[in-house]
Image: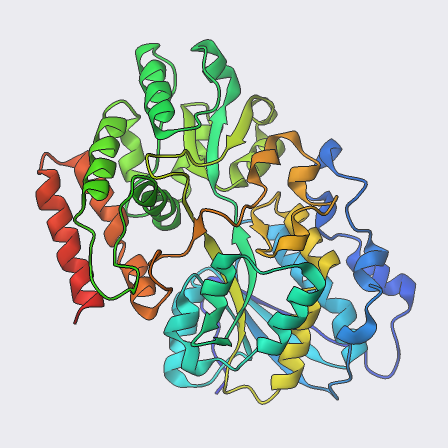
Amino acid sequence: MKLSLPLNASSTRVTPRQGSSLSRREILSLLAGTGAAIGLGACASTGSPSAADLAFADDDTFIADYAGAQLRALMRNSNFTDLNSVTIRQAASWSQESNATIDFDFDDRWRETFARVVADGAGPDIAELYGNATHRYANKLIDVSDVAEEAEARLGDWFEAARAVGVVDGVWRAIPWASTSHAINFREDLLDEIGQSAPQTYDDLLHVATLLRDAGLPQAAISMGEGATNDSGNFAYSMLWSFGGQEVDDMGKRVVLDSAGTRAALAYFRELAAVSDPRALSFDEFANNAAFLDGSIALTQNAPSIFLAAQQGAPAIAEAMNHARYPAGPAGRHQLVEMNSLGVCDHSRNIEAAKGWLRHAMRRELLVARASASLAFFVPPIGGIAEDSGMPWNTVDQLRELKPLDDGAHMTGWPGPSSVESALVYENRTIGRMFAAVASSDDSIGSIVRTASDELARVYET
């Protein structure tokens, strides 16, 4: 079956040239627009990979002849639109050298599209997966342990959260390709006006939000709206853990959400919302970006897409803003990792070629270029990359706090194992809606947490 592209998807083919070879100059021309220069301006690092690095890495073992194999890859349609072009250009040398064709379908609704692929048992060879979806679809994904182990040998240890995503019952079913660097985006100039620096704890954040309100300045605005699926979910889980709450026990079987830690987190967020911009409870994924860029809020949680947009269209905001890690709570500093992985579908007729492209995609030079292109929006969750001189946090002052740390970074369901159930709970938005409810209603915290616990029980315990 050939999938019909949805209206919000675009398709691009990368093919070898038939009957001739691309010259080195031609390949360099194809790669000339890749990520290191996108949006960075004067901040670009001399340590970023050159086009020559991208086309001709030292390790030639990535390239094999796949004898005219035709691949199709279902991919996230990036908010960084030029990043799609980076992916295409990075595949150019692999396609030429491997004698393979690869089609990229960049889809806004990639998660839903892949669910249909699984139901049909046909479609793309390669799919980009979100979060714990690897566990949900593990029986439809081939074993890619060899690719994961090769990457670890070259690039350093996989982060704990990456293993939690990629490994199902002891087998790597997907390659964690990119995690998204969520942080507190804030206006340094406005915090200077109230004599404050970046909040390091949740108490600090509440104090900053209160001072901004009392001074009549643009307020704090932590998104918790139904439409802000990733922004609100990311902060809600992180806050829950940092106050000592968790959705299930360490075995991932019994719901333990109704705890002193959870109730403390909910009580805290009710206080924070009361001194913050009320629009935050209805923000979708883009509204907080827009409000920050138009100067009407001083602080929000987001990936660095705000910074890129500010560089391109609001340079005064870009100059005045910075990023801080999510705060620490009574139980320490914890953060949900938003992770994208690459899996090979078991219905593929070109499995070895598909694994060949995964190996290519995990080359150091290409990973660094993608991270640079996205200003650390997409970063590889593997140890050796973080110290690379070309990574954005090593070259751009406002991105230094985005350097990934393995400690305190978790997937949904933690401290229980990643699972099908934890993936479904995230999709249901139970945790985010629980926090939104304490801010938008007068219902008791006990009633709200019991409702959420009942929702979790229907997933985990039935």
Q: Quadrant of residue 145?
A: bottom right
Residue at the location (64% across, 65% down)? 152
Residue drawn 67% across and 74% down? 357
Taking depth in this image into account, of 352 and 32 the one nearest to the observer is 352
* Percent position of residue 293, x then y: 49, 29
Would you place residue 122 above or below residue 383 in this image?
Answer: below
- Residue 376 seen anywhere in this rendered image of the structure: yes
What is the quadrant of residue 138 in the picture? bottom left
Here the colouring is: rainbow
How many marks the image carries: the answer is: 0
Residue visible at 59% across and 38% down in the picture: 308
Instruction: Look at the image and tell me whether residue 103 can be seen.
Output: no
Query: Compared to 421, does 403 lie above or below?
Result: above
Residue 441 in the image, given as x and y percentages of width and height: 13, 36
Left or right: 416 in relation to 68? left
Task: Give the residue displayed 60% in from the left and 55% down from the top.
Answer: 380
Residue 45 position, x and y percent, is 76, 39
Left or right, 160 with reference to 369 = left
Is residue 27 left or right of 86 when viewed as pictured? Answer: right
In the rendered image, the vertical position of residue 145 relative to residue 425, given as above or below = below
Q: Say above or below: 180 vs 439.
A: below
Quadrant of the frame with the C terminus: bottom left
Viewer-side residue, 439 vs 292:
439
Question: Which residue occupies the foreground of this view, 1 or 344?
Answer: 344
